[in-house]
């Protein structure tokens, strides 16, 4: 029985509080496409993706009209490309096939040009990482990920060094767009196999042939709910967030199941991640300020974010038996108007953001840094973020954008959901000798669980 009050609450969340389904992401396995012939492999990739996703955009638009729920993005994730391109010396034709398939199906992005190298690299993994500057600068809709660390395996410093060099070169190749190519690449620790959000989405090898995963976002809904409990103790604040997250997740559950039914695909997961946008009223930073901070990034920010993240997860798991992905709070600097303004005021530094990533859903996300930062320093920042994930047994990532020609205090405009980013100061002390050691940082004792 549908409660009319639930319907009215949902309509209000959509109309006034910017609730949306941020993405319907169709995960597709490409393991059946493997071939030692590049042309045959690419044809199989293109045919598989376009066949399985041919109705994805149509179904998303139908649900949007019929249910009245905004669905911002329709996306595809695929098997990590390094796993299917092992026989190729150059995997970039696979990236072009994926890009062509994305354009044919009409999706916004396709993720999965990826490698899983937390314990070591195959020749195919190394070739894929080295191809990232070419692949991402020559395609429009392809997103990439590299998992360089895990709690069970430790941190692959050789892979991190390669990623730093790839990011630096990709920035230079896309200098005319402010290094935007780097916004399509995430370097992970403890990456999950069912994440529907870009740029880090891929359809993990532990997944089935295909699945529908939905990502729901509602920072504005949480902010509005917290306005009703101003001055209340923290446990009441957490309870308010939990109840709100429950309601938001229920919307995602309905959309995910309906999309799966219409596509004839299995329902995968609902990812409840408070993913902000540059629009007013859609900011995680504003939630933290509503909790009681003068400005996001000031003292208390990490504690407030920890409470928010935990309460979101608790509310989500009560609403659906299939909560997955990352599910929590994102803090992408360029995509959150409150974060942008806090950085411009000097309240947010890269060091404070790193501290906050210890308790949020992902990591250093959409961080613009000076173009002069060296590849080794980029690798060192990635290593720091990976260490946080490995030691705390959580997913962390780094999506760093060195902006050619820009210095700390400047800004860069990416447009759309990617927003604008103030260029953050990066300390100039070198970590080159550390990064050039290579090898693998062993797994922490917490990884020995059997």
Image (cartoon, rainbow, N blue to C red):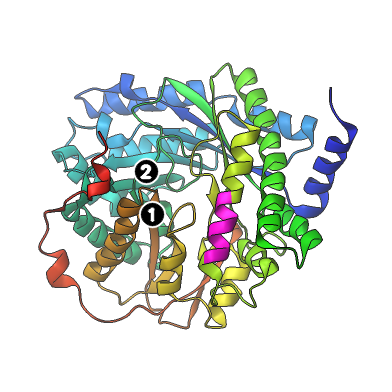
Q: In which quarter of the image is the C terminus?
A: top left
Which quadrant of the figure has residue 416?
Answer: bottom right
Residue 319 at least partly seen? yes
230 lies above or below 19: below
Disc ID at residue 397? 1
Tell me: 424 left or right of 444.
Answer: right
Is residue 15 found inside the magenta-colored segment of the image? Answer: no
On the image, the x and y values in percent for residue 92 come to 28, 42
Task: Give the residue drawn at x 31%, y 54%.
Answer: 391
342 lies above or below 280: below
On the image, the x and y values in percent for residue 147 come to 30, 46
Instruction: Give the spatial CA distance, label 1 vs label 2.
Output: 8 Å
Q: Is mark 2 on a helix, strand or loop?
A: loop
Task: Give the residue drawn at x 67%, y 45%.
Answer: 245
| Observer-nearest of 92 and 149 | 149
| Observer-nearest of 182 and 449 | 449
On the image, the x and y values in percent for residue 405 come to 38, 78
The residue pinned by badge 2 equals 191
Magenta stretch bounds: 303-310
Which quadrant of the figure has residue 253?
Answer: top right
Q: Earlier in the sequence, mark 1 or mark 2?
A: 2
Label 1 close to label 2 by CB (< 8 Å)? yes
On the image, the x and y values in percent for residue 102 come to 48, 36
């Amino acid at each position: 029985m549908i409660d009319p009050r639930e319907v009215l609450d949902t309509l209000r969340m959509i109309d006034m509080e910017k609730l949306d389904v941020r993405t319907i992401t169709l995960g597709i396995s490409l393991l059946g496409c493997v071939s030692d012939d590049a042309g045959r492999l690419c044809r199989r990739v293109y045919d598989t993706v376009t066949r399985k996703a041919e109705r994805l955009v149509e179904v998303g638009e139908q649900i949007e009209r019929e249910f009245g729920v905004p669905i911002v993005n329709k996306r595809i994730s695929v098997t990590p490309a390094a796993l299917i391109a092992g026989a190729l010396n150059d995997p970039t034709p696979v990236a072009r096939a994926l890009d062509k398939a994305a354009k044919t199906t009409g999706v916004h992005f396709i993720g999965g040009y990826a490698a899983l190298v937390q314990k070591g690299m195959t020749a195919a993994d190394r070739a894929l990482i080295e191809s990232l500057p070419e692949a991402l600068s020559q395609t429009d809709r392809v997103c990439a990920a590299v998992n360089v660390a895990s709690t069970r395996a430790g941190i692959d410093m050789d892979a991190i060094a390669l990623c730093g060099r790839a990011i630096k070169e990709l920035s230079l190749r896309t200098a005319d767009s402010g290094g935007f190519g780097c916004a399509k690449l995430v370097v992970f620790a403890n990456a999950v196999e069912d994440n529907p959000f870009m740029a880090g989405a891929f359809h993990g090898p532990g997944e089935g042939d295909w699945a529908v995963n939905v990502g729901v976002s509602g920072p504005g809904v949480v902010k509005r709910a917290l306005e009703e409990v101003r001055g209340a103790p923290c446990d009441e604040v957490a309870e308010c967030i939990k109840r709100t997250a429950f309601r938001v997740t229920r919307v995602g559950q309905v959309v995910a199941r309906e999309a799966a039914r219409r596509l004839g695909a299995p329902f995968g997961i609902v990812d409840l991640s408070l993913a902000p946008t540059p629009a007013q009223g859609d900011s995680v930073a504003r939630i933290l300020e509503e909790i009681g901070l003068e400005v996001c990034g000031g003292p208390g920010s990490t504690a407030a974010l920890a409470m928010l993240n935990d309460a979101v997860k608790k509310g989500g798991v009560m609403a659906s038996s299939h909560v997955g992905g990352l599910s929590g709070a994102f803090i992408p600097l360029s995509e959150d108007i409150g974060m942008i303004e806090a950085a411009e005021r000097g309240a947010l530094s890269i060091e404070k953001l790193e501290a906050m990533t210890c308790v949020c859903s992902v990591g250093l996300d959409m961080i613009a840094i000076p173009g002069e930062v060296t590849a080794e320093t980029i690798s060192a920042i990635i290593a720091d973020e990976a260490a946080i994930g490995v030691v705390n047994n959580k997913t962390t990532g780094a999506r760093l954008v060195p902006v050619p020609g820009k210095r700390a205090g400047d800004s860069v405009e990416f447009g759309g959901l990617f927003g604008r980013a103030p260029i953050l100061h990066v300390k100039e002390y070198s970590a080159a000798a550390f990064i050039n050691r290579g090898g693998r940082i062993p797994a922490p004792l917490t990884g020995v669980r059997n």
